[in-house]
Image: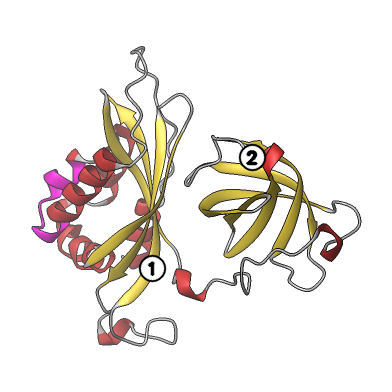
Amino acid sequence: MRILIAGLMAVALAAVGLGQSAPAPDPTGDSMRKTFDSCNDAIRSRNFQGVLAQMTAATRKQFVTLIPPSQRTPFFLNAMLMVPNSYEVESVSESKDGKSASLVVVAVLPPMPPEMQDQKDPGGPRKRELTVSFAREAGMWKIASRDVGDDPDKRPRPKDLKMGQRSDYSAGANTDMGGVILRAEKQEAGTVYVIRVVDEEDAVYVQADMVSPDFVTGKVVSFHAAQNANDPLKYWAESAKLEK
């Protein structure tokens, strides 16, 4: 049943265009958080219809098909383990057409029950990164999927954001890379962007003349860059492009 719940929460769905004008953007993710919180409240109260009300139509269909009434009790027992005791928003990313978005949060999850504890989850509260994907339906954000990542504090990251000089990097740009901007630090002649690349954090130095006002937290940016000779998680960008 645990595998079933994880699979259901990871159903990824394409946003459906409804022929309406693009809704106002939600750069802070307030309306997404309200949907996310309402779904969590419904799980806590074991309100299956309340859970479905926060889902996209396709996800609701999946839930109704795969979780009949006889499976609702084990569903809620497992789903409760994924409901945060608390969380902080790490990033918000909305598509250019305003039809889909993702909310990334750093959450403190309840302890696993003793029979489910292992080396990864030895007991006690669990810090995890959650990625919640949304699609707009009838002008409202609905949850398409929810994915659970690892503890972000354990991700490899640069030792610091002291980027040095161009001569500290490969002579030629040797890396094409990209990821979600987690944070940025403006420096004397440019800006350092910390991006998420799979399960690590990389720091990319972008010279001032290549910095765009569109390079903000939650956006996906790609770079053609040179790698630092001493810290493989630092890069010097030769070009930068907003992806979404």
- Going by the image, does 186 lie left or right of 222? left
The main secondary structure of the magenta stretch is helix
Q: Residues within 10 Å of mark 2 (few under 14, many from 20)?
A: some
Amino acid marked by disc 2: Val
- Residue 21 located within the stretch drawn in magenta: no
Image-quadrant location for residue 214 = top right
- Going by the image, does 211 lie left or right of 90? right
Specify the quadrant that holds the N terminus.
bottom left
Between disc 2 and disc 1, the foreground one is: 2
Q: Measured from the top left, where is residue 203 in percent x and y?
A: 64, 60
Question: For residue 211, which numbered disc appears in the image?
Answer: 2
Secondary element under disc 2, as helix, strand or loop, is loop
**Nearest to the observer: residue 19 or residue 162:** 162
Image-quadrant location for residue 70 = bottom left
- Whichever of callouts 2 and 1 sits on the residue coming sooner in the sequence is 1
Q: Measured from the top left, where is residue 24 in percent x and y?
A: 32, 24
Question: For residue 128, which numbered disc appears in the image?
Answer: 1
Q: Measured from the top left, where is residue 228 in percent x and y?
A: 78, 65
**Nearest to the observer: residue 238 or residue 38:** 238
Above or below, 174 relative to 3:
above
What's the magenta region?
A: 43-52
Q: Measured from the top left, where is residue 153 in percent x and y?
A: 47, 73
- Residue 44 located within the stretch drawn in magenta: yes
